[in-house]
Image (spheres, rainbow, N blue to C red):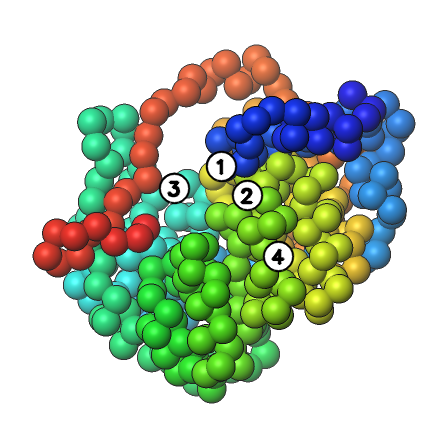
Amino acid sequence: PGRIEDLWQYLVRGTYWRGGPVLMTALAGVDLALWDIKGKRAGLPVYSLLGGKTREGALVYTHCGGRDFQEVEEQVRAAMERGFRVIRCQVAVPGNAGTYGVGGAREAASATWTSADPSVALEATDGGPLPETERWEPYAYLRTIPRLFEHLRSTVGEEVELLHDVHERLNPVQAARLAKELEPYHLFFLEDPLRPEHRESFRLIRQHSTTPLAMGELFHTRWDALPLIQEQLIDFIRCDLGHIGGITEARKIAALAETYYVQTAWHGPGDIAPITHAANVHLDISIPNFGVQEMVFFSEQVRSVITGGPEYRDGALWVTDAPGLGTDVDEREAAKYPYQRAYLPTVRRFDGSVHDW
């Protein structure tokens, strides 16, 4: 287990079929376990094995959302009181039931999506024959989001960094329009404006806007990220350590990004385990081009199964000197929570046609 790089190469290149979300997620599980084992054998935290600290803590952002601008503002103020300096903001769009991100931090941690209709809560389905369906229209969204940030800047001011997740639901012209219209509100970044197969269309956004861009949570290898980084079409790379092959691949992506002045902002939602979140932070504090880290607060049930890990304090996550990733799994406690099949929602437009989730 000490030959982490060799085992990674063997599992990727030693077979004919490679890549994709399933194989790279499985590989990530193996990779994170190997780094954890190596650290625990050596009695050292993983960040020490990666070259040691370049910073003491990792700046983080949380999620705020609401059914209207006032509700988002209230969540932002509450997050600021908890010490957050960077906040993702989403809002319900009139006519778009189940708008992504409306549930804020609760949604991020529990896979529960809040509808624009207060009487409706859209949750990951319970394993029935088909997922729930949300309705979504891009034009209403494009009218709403600039107004949200106009409201927030006029109420909470400029002393907090704000960002927004498009969730890859726009076409290139729409994304360029949104990025341009958001310029006056000085976003920290605009996340995932386009689908990953539209990487070349980031040029169009760059030509029309100076709003910083972040992309990458659906990438599976460094080659997916390569053109966006080399052409400096993004400002933050957002790969998911749990889906891109683990620390071994992610640190190579970070090194590539450093060459082109691109910072990291690893994916950190509630549907990846605290072990992966811990790996995020160990990598964050060991690389020079770290930007920001997405985070969630896990439930007591999750924390009873996976113990340890980084601690939140004053707008950042701080790792301990515990060996490995600093986490442990209580298998007896885990047995209390058997797997339950569930799905994310799907999205359709008003005419019934499928739209990107």
Q: Is residue 172 left or right of residue 186?
A: left
Q: Which mark is residue 111?
A: 3
- Is 170 placed left or right of 218 in the picture? left
Asked if residue 242 is positioned above or below residue 253 in the image, the reply reads above
Q: In what element is the residue under mark 4?
A: helix
Q: Nearer the viewer, residue 266 or 150?
A: 266
What residue sits right under mark 1 in the picture? 21
State the residue position of label 4. Answer: 226
Give the foreground label among 2 and 4: 4
Q: Amino acid at mark 3?
A: Ala
Disc 4: CA contacts within 10 A as few (<14), some (14-19) or many (>=20): some
Q: Residue at x 82, y 24 (%)?
A: 2
Q: Earlier in the sequence, mark 4 or mark 3?
A: 3
Q: CA distance from mark 1 to mark 3?
A: 19 Å
Task: From this view, report whether residue 333 is shown above or below residue 120.
Answer: above
Real-space Cα distance between discs 2 and 3? 22 Å
Sooner in the amino-acid sequence: mark 2 or mark 3: 3
Compared across the picture, whether 183 is left or right of 316 comes to left
Q: Give the tally of numbered discs.
A: 4
Residue identifier under label 2: 220
Q: Nearer the viewer, mark 1 or mark 3?
A: 1
Q: CA distance from mark 2 to mark 1?
A: 6 Å
Alpha carbons under labels 2 and 4: distance apart: 12 Å
Q: Residue at x 57, y 63 (%)?
A: 228
Q: Tell me the quadrant of the picture where the N terminus can be found.
A: top right
